[in-house]
Image (tube, coloured by chain):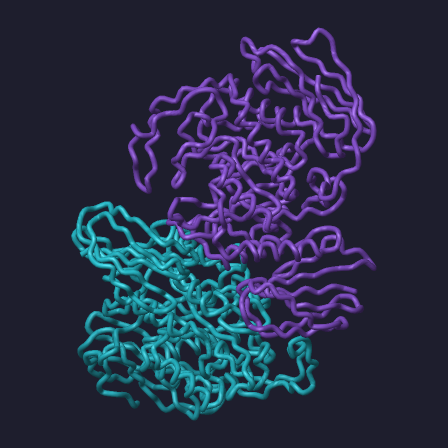
Chain colours: A cyan, B purple
Amino acid sequence: MEYQKQVERWGMLEVSVKGPATGNPFTEQWIRGTFTGHGQKVTAHGFYDGEGVYKVRFMPGYEGEYHFTIEASFMDAPEAGSFTATAPSEGNHGPVKVAYQYHFAYEDGKMYYPVGTTCYVWELQSKELQEKTLAELAKGYFNKIRFCVFPKHYIYNFHEPISYPYEGTPCDTSEMTRQNFGEYSREDHGNHWDFYRFNPAHFRHIEDCIVRLQELGVEADIIVMHPYDRWGFSKMQPDQDDLYWHYVVNRFSAYRNVWWSFANEWDLLRAKSIADWERYAQIVVENDPYQHLRSIHNCRNFYDYSKPWVTHCCIQRQPDVMPVEMTNQWRERYQKPIIIDELCYEGNIAPHWGSISGPEMVRRFWETTLRGGYAGHGETFIHPQNILWWSHGGELHGESPERLRFLRQILEELPQGGLRYGGRRTSYNQEKMPGGRMVRLDYLGKSTPAILEYHMDEPGEYKVEVIDTWNMTIDDQGIFGRNITVDLPGREFMAVRITRL
Amino acid sequence: MEYQKQVERWGMLEVSVKGPATGNPFTEQWIRGTFTGHGQKVTAHGFYDGEGVYKVRFMPGYEGEYHFTIEASFMDAPEAGSFTATAPSEGNHGPVKVAYQYHFAYEDGKMYYPVGTTCYVWELQSKELQEKTLAELAKGYFNKIRFCVFPKHYIYNFHEPISYPYEGTPCDTSEMTRQNFGEYSREDHGNHWDFYRFNPAHFRHIEDCIVRLQELGVEADIIVMHPYDRWGFSKMQPDQDDLYWHYVVNRFSAYRNVWWSFANEWDLLRAKSIADWERYAQIVVENDPYQHLRSIHNCRNFYDYSKPWVTHCCIQRQPDVMPVEMTNQWRERYQKPIIIDELCYEGNIAPHWGSISGPEMVRRFWETTLRGGYAGHGETFIHPQNILWWSHGGELHGESPERLRFLRQILEELPQGGLRYGGRRTSYNQEKMPGGRMVRLDYLGKSTPAILEYHMDEPGEYKVEVIDTWNMTIDDQGIFGRNITVDLPGREFMAVRITRL
């Protein structure tokens, strides 16, 4: 039994145990640990990591001494151990949880305002490309990234991934018929996978990526299932699915920056029923000791976000008549945080969802945020080598990322709490306490007034700033009493921030 | 009895008869005419025009000889007359009617594609300003204008009109309290009107304006009632309302370019019930011999456009979550033409509805039009002398008018028929007849693809053009077979027009 003697709070203890490599260790063996420390007792299920090595992972939620016992199907008797959870290092604020009903905070209380991006299979590209992605993420544009465990088959995504989640061999694409936009037909040309034997290297690599993201302060919003598939991973049998969900949860749960995105476009996974999703949810709820954030992303039809296991709404904006301006209504309806994790991508590919402009991307972010929700970025510029950020990562080419970092800065300057939509254009800081600092934000979007008047409810002193959300400037207009007149440039994409002093 | 001996088809015959000027001619007398000609027999009610003159008006719908008789409460016996309806002069296509269920055509069959504007009380401003308005309209930006019979009391609109519809004197605004944005409180400070005695000069002036518009090819969409009132015209008694509706209909019906807009923001006219509106509708339906187009404009709540008397939907776009992208849904719901006659104004005043940018105005027009509807313009730029096109007319300052004229040009180049929304981005010419010319329009709006592929259903030759709706250019990309690849600049506001040859 090998493990560290010291782990920082919200770090990861990993206990490795040697065991049998014969038969099918994935289905025939089990291992688990029970961890006890200050205020916390957790049973964590482990997993087989290949080559006769079994692992149990644990994330300590408190500082101080922890004791644990490990049991396994192949052990004669439980073995005991202990370690010390030390203070978290700088930048480690613990996992993100729902806070103030509609918002998020790290477990140490620091607010977390999601400004995410999507790179579906960035981690399954070449090492060089992965490093480019991480270098872009290091610029601090985003604090969350959505990506898949399974490889992706879709327009601009027809090459093979660097590894597969299962033992076996993929179908031969050279025998498949190509269609519009180069997409393959869906006939199966010879996939050979053993859905009862995982490829641990595939998962270890994803874990390396989770840690790299953690170091950059980026949450890993892991998409466990998706429909863009030619390998058969979206059409496994229920017992195979369940084995997969257990394996994923047992491996990844102890990483503090993990979120569970049950599916991308769940409603396109035609082989799965609601009962299937609810069964997966039960597996996650029962086996993730840390209750990481859980949601499920839609194409056309929303999943029933009122289900208790759903911690927040992960919404793909519906086209045209259900724009991001619905955010505050969705918030009321579901009484949970709203993240519009997909609201079209900045880019120039043919599909409507992959060709909005930078200004429109930034506008949608501000509009969503002002309405008390959060949004997600993605980028789809045509690239000579078919490297599109949305799927592959690489380099960003758009105009929105630095503006989204600016938005994040505005959010992080809020007093504790989040924004609550107060009606047309106006959002208030949620924690508008008597005597406390209050912030009011007006986002004008496509509205281009040259003047605005405010008549604040309460007497007092108010600091007034005009924010140009596109040019990323903040113009201090000075201190006013309750009657305020703001001069504006008559351009689109302005905001007004009024802070009660 | 005086009248013309020759009137062009869809012109106006006016029969003047001397009668009593004593008592109250508006309520105590009546006059009517019965006109018979080729294929047409019409009873038209007349009106008292002051100074002992009574008038009956008639619009001949056909060429040839017409005979008529005039009866009146003050005439001992009917008097007969006749006149010749000659061929219409150039530019006279007759009144506009609903065509192809969702579109409009003049009575001579020429399609009419509304591209309207709103200047609520342009005709009640100074003569100089009226001429400026007409000079702007002569530039051909618009082919419809919405304006009110009653004067308007609203922000930027607190001066008195050049005339009033009734005999009497207005309240004294110097005694009224001013509030935010300079609006007056609504206390009544001494209006003195006789709601049973019209001021014929007020109506004669409006008729002069209707004719001036007619000469410019502009339809007069007359707003009969509205809530922006300090004179009490929005709070008359039912019998006074009915008298007013009869008077308006009897005076204006015979002008071929008249449309009836029953109200602006009917739902803000708190003193009126649905029963009132339905009663007004009955007056118009029974007394307008030509069945001019009829609709009613909303603030928050749509009137029930499925009522038989409503010929088309006149919609003020609902904010945020009911954008112009609803057009095709509204069309399906009401099975009538859709005109979003108000979708916010290009300008820079403080209210959200008066501060959209030129590009956004043009985008909304294209989006509405592509979805098989029509839209309306308005402009609200802050002006040193408080002259805002939206209410006063004058000069246009925005960027949208010339782009809207360009849109109108694109519409007028369609083969007979209108557009039908075919799903995301795509609209078809409605009259897609086998073997006939077919036009397909894709409006890309905020979508910025660099390439689009088309695979047309039918073999043939297709002319492909890329339209820059903002820069007003049409780039001919040549003739293609059924498989088409279009190169695009990756900018917003592009359209693709594909014409089957």
In front of the other: A393 or B292: B292
Kindly identify the residue that appears in the image at 60 percent across and 63 percent down.
B472
Number of marks: 0
Kindly identify the residue that appears in the image at 62 percent across and 66 percent down.
B473
> Looking at the picture, does residue B404 appear above or below residue A76?
above
Left or right, A291 with reference to B500? left
Residue A237 in view of the camera: no
Q: Position of residue B414 (x, y in %)?
A: 71, 56
Dividing the picture into quarters, in which one does residue B254 lie?
top right
> Looking at the picture, does residue B22 appear above or below residue A313?
above
Kindly identify the residue that appears in the image at 45 percent across and 54 percent down.
B356
Kindly identify the residue that appears in the image at 70 percent across and 39 percent down.
B97
In front of the other: A471 or B306: A471
**Farthest-out residue, top:** B76
Q: Position of residue B355 (x, y in %)?
A: 43, 52
**Farthest-out residue, front:** B128
> Looking at the picture, does residue B38 appear above or below residue A133?
above
Residue A102 in view of the camera: yes
Q: Position of residue A146 (x, y in %)?
A: 43, 74
Q: Position of residue A189 (x, y in %)?
A: 67, 83
- Considering the image in quadrants, where does the C terminus of chain A appear? bottom left
- Considering the image in quadrants, where does the N terminus of chain A appear? bottom left
Dividing the picture into quarters, in which one does residue B296 lie?
top right
In front of the other: A350 or A390: A350
